[in-house]
Image (cartoon, rainbow, N blue to C red):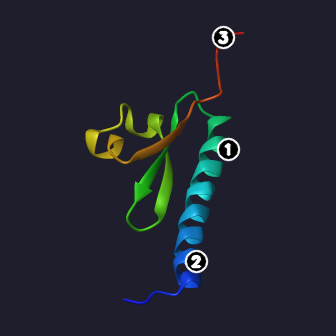
Amino acid sequence: MYVSHSTADDGYHADQAAFVAALDQAHARSYHSYFTQYVLTDGEAGYIAVDEGDYDALPKALLDRVIDTVPGRLSDEF
C-alpha cells in the first residue's frame, strides 16, 4: 500500500497537536485545583484532560488510558 509521506505527517501532527492542547488544558486547570489533572487517550478527541476531583479516585478503565499527569497547584498549607 502506498501512503504519501505528507499524509502520514499530517496525522502525526494532528495527534501531537491534540496531545499538546490537552496537556495545556491540564496545566491551566492545575492552578485552580487541589487535585491531579490527567491527560487521557480518547477515541473521539484523541486526548482529553480530566480532574481527579471529578471522579474521586479514577476508575480502572480511566487509569489504563492515562498518558501524563499534572499535580494540582492549590494548597491550604502556607
Q: Position of residue 13 (x, y in %)?
A: 60, 69
Instruction: Please tell me which of labels 3 and 2 falls first in the chain.
Output: 2
Residue where numbered disc 2 is placed: 10
Q: Secondary structure at mark 2?
A: helix
Query: Which residue is the extreme one toward the front?
Result: 2
Q: Which amino acid, mark 2?
A: Asp
Instruction: Please tell me which of labels 3 and 1 falls first in the chain.
Output: 1
Residue where numbered disc 1 is placed: 28
In which image quadrant can residue 31 be found? top right
Residue 77 - label: 3
Instruction: Please tell me which of labels 2 and 1 falls first in the chain.
Output: 2
Other-residue count near label 1 (Cα within 10 Å), few / some / many at <14 / 14–19 / ≥20: some
Q: Which quarter of the rendering shows the C terminus?
A: top right
Q: Position of residue 41 (x, y in %)?
A: 42, 55
> Residue at 37% across / 65% down in the picture?
43
Residue 8 - label: none
Query: Which residue is the extreme one toward the left?
Result: 60
> Residue at 37% across / 48% down in the picture?
65
Instruction: Choose mark 3 or mark 2, whichever is in front.
Output: 2
> Residue at 45% across / 36% down in the picture?
52
> Residue at 52% across / 30% down in the picture?
35
Query: Which residue is the extreme one toward the bottom?
Result: 2
Left or right of residue 19, residue 62 in this image: left
Q: Which amino acid, mark 3?
A: Glu
